[in-house]
Image (tube, grey):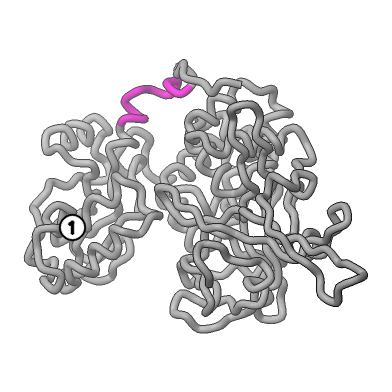
Amino acid sequence: MAADLIYAFRVMRLPLLDAGGAPIGRIEDIVAIPGRAGKGREPAIPPRVVGFVANSQRRRIFVNANRIAELNSDGARLRSWDVDLNPFKRRPGEVLIGAELIDRRIGDETVSDIALRPQEDARSTYWVIDKVRLARRNTLRRRPSYRLVDFDEVPALFEAQTAMQAEAARLREFHPAEVAAVVRALPIDQRRQLAEAMDDERLADVLEELPEAEQVRIVEQLDRDRLVGVFDEMEYDDLADLLGEMAPADQERMLGVMDVDDAEVIRRLLSYEEGTAGGLMTPEVIILGPDATVAEALAQVRDPDWVVSIATQIFVTQAPYKAPTGKLVGVVHVQRLLREPPNMGIGRLVADDPTVTPDATDREVAEILASYDLLAVAVTDEAGRLLGAVTVDDVLDRMLGAGWRTRRKRTVET
């Protein structure tokens, strides 16, 4: 597709591809949320694509934009093999580019197409609405004339319907911790409205920055479909901490909306005592076998979905390679990978870093991380199998105490 711009009309004819590149459906429409017009010195914030409506297995489904690894002339290729086949349901504030914007009248012109521009942040690639192509028909000419304008030249096309949708757009460029400070200052009904105006990934990021008790208040207001999307974006350890604040009946209700495999992982994490390595760990780490090459390991590290504290090391184990794994062989750090040839097996590069058992105290974990200058430490069972890892950011959360987030003075200027 030409340059950076990707035109919606063309996207809506592309096949939906699985992670291996095989067609599994077809894109029918594009779902976007409002941006924000520039005010004074504040720049305009473009509307953002949150997902795609696709037809797969005779179902009209929603594909979250975060699930798309690549969008080009071949199609929209998924990042993983998982596909949510639940029927598409539009949420408040969302707009369908094909069904509602294309062919819409703007004065004496008509929207003939909308151009998307890919953007990158620390975690992923996403798409924003950048340009609008307008067509004008003239009785003296057989063909219409066209012009391409910036999205903010046609503000009525992308206006937020509510004040909280506009606020969600304003906060889109802020760090989730800063947004969490704003959320804490709002009355409970406005918190709910702001949560509804955020996309799943953004809400998940903000929830992870809130104290668990406040997370519970927001999550309890979400319907089942929204819970599925938000839980899918949250880290396992943060999700376990959230459910750990709930009564057993509420825990079961939340577990019931999850994928069976995800629910099993969360149940396992909830079985560990609070204040232990098991209660702190995440099972989502980079795991490879000893025969994997340096090139394969670096390809895993480059995946933007991994947080920094996880992406600094590869855990090398015997099969199976999903926690709980086979016996842990050792750890390979990224700096070592960068010094070796791409075809070298990583089994030759492992470091004999210390490990902890699930019942180790959070204090013991903190001392090991500090003593060995590690960003994460492996958690293993009695047989030496890898169960997960505890990262330094989670240890800091625990060491700072339950109320540290509410004591933070840094806020976003309103």
- The crowding category of the residue bearing disc 1, from other C-alpha atoms within 10 Å (few below 14, some 14 to 19, many at least 20), is some
Q: Residue at x 21, y 58 (%)?
A: 315
Q: Is residue 377 above or below residue 406?
A: below
Q: Identify which residue, 303 or 320, lies in the foreground.
A: 303
Q: Quadrant of residue 51?
A: bottom right
Q: Position of residue 379 (x, y in %)?
A: 24, 49
Q: Amino acid at mark 1?
A: Gly
Magenta run includes residue 236: no
Q: Is residue 227 above or below residue 368?
A: below
Q: Residue at x 70, y 36 (%)?
A: 166
What residue did someone put label 1 on? 384
Residue 147 seen in the figure: yes
Q: Quadrant of residue 366?
A: top left
Could you tell me what secondary structure mostly forms the magenta stretch? helix
Q: Residue at x 66, y 81 (%)?
A: 57
Q: Which residues make up the magenta segment?
A: 396-405
Residue 263 seen in the figure: no
Q: Position of residue 234 (x, y in %)?
A: 49, 48
Residue 236 appears left or right of 27 = left
Q: What is the number of callouts on the image?
A: 1
Residue 297 appears left or right of 70 = left
Q: Identify which residue, 307 or 374, lies in the foreground.
A: 307
Residue 64 appears left or right of 303 = right
Q: Position of residue 149 (x, y in %)?
A: 68, 53
Magenta run includes residue 401: yes
Q: Secondary structure at mark 1?
A: loop
Q: Quadrant of residue 62?
A: bottom right
Which residue is the extreme one toward the right? 139
Q: Identify which residue, 276 or 156, lies in the foreground.
A: 156
Q: Identify which residue, 36 or 406, lies in the foreground.
A: 36
